[in-house]
Amino acid sequence: MSNITMQGKLVQVTRGNGLYMLSLDTGNAGGLLVLSATAEQYHTLFPAGDPALNDQYEVTFNQTNERITLLNVFDLADEVIPADLVPTLTSTQDYDLQGDDFMDTKKEAAALEKRLAAIRQYETLMQNIQTVVDQEENERLAKIKARQDGQGIEQLFTEEEIAQMSAPKTNTQPQGASLSARTQVSAQGEETKGE
């Protein structure tokens, strides 16, 4: 009694007398191989329904002197989950089933409160924490005051630059004349020079 595994193209599935006959074209390995399966075996081997024809399959069967027993049929085009991923998938399913236990935050909240109570018992630790909190508060207030006084990066111009921008500027161009009138006056001045 030995198990034999072969690969080939499933070309036909026929039904008769309560049996299913699977015709597998093994190519050069031996031609056409016809395997029989009972209705129960057939539905166990193909739980999703009839198999796709003309796909490559791997069949495992047991051959004795009297008969051939079909053990397994596997479509080589199917998606396969590697065996090393099965534990990960199993644990993922466990997480889904135990989601309520993982989402129970009461236990975690109680553990956190117990830890905080233990920390609050140490006076020196609480004093150190209060000192750090006070220092941070003082630094924050100092930064706010510095920004309000314009002593940080917000001060864009010095007082000297502000005074220069605020000072009235002397205008060297004649007042009241338009640009076209000024160009006409200068053009007439050049004509008189040329004569």
Image (spheres, helix red, strand yellow):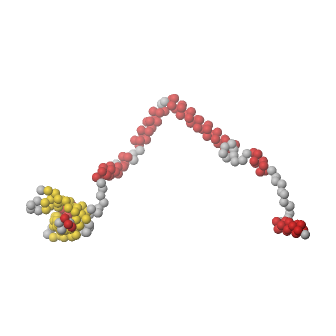
Q: Give the percent coordinates (x, y) of residue 80.
A: 29, 58
Q: Give the percent coordinates (x, y) of residue 75.
A: 26, 62
Which residue does the image show at 64% across and 39% down from the upper left?
142
Which residue does the image show at 46% across and 36% down from the upper left?
116
Q: Which of 159 and 107 is in front in this view?
A: 159
Which residue does the image show at 37% across and 48% down from the upper left?
100
Which residue does the image show at 90% across and 69% down from the upper left?
195
Residue 177, quarter of picture: bottom right
How many marks can you see? 0
Left or right placement of residue 161 versus residue 125 in this view:
right
Residue 58, quarter of picture: bottom left
Q: In this view, does 52 lie above or below 160?
A: below
Q: Give the percent coordinates (x, y) of residue 11.
A: 22, 69
Outermost residue toward the front?
195
Report the quarter where the N terminus lies: bottom left
Left or right placement of residue 80 versus residue 143 in this view:
left
Q: Specify whether residue 46 is in view.
A: no
Q: Specify whether residue 3 is in view.
A: yes
Q: Is residue 120 above or below residue 59?
A: above
Left or right placement of residue 65 versus residue 132 in this view:
left
Residue 113, quarter of picture: top left
Q: Give the percent coordinates (x, y) of residue 73.
A: 22, 61
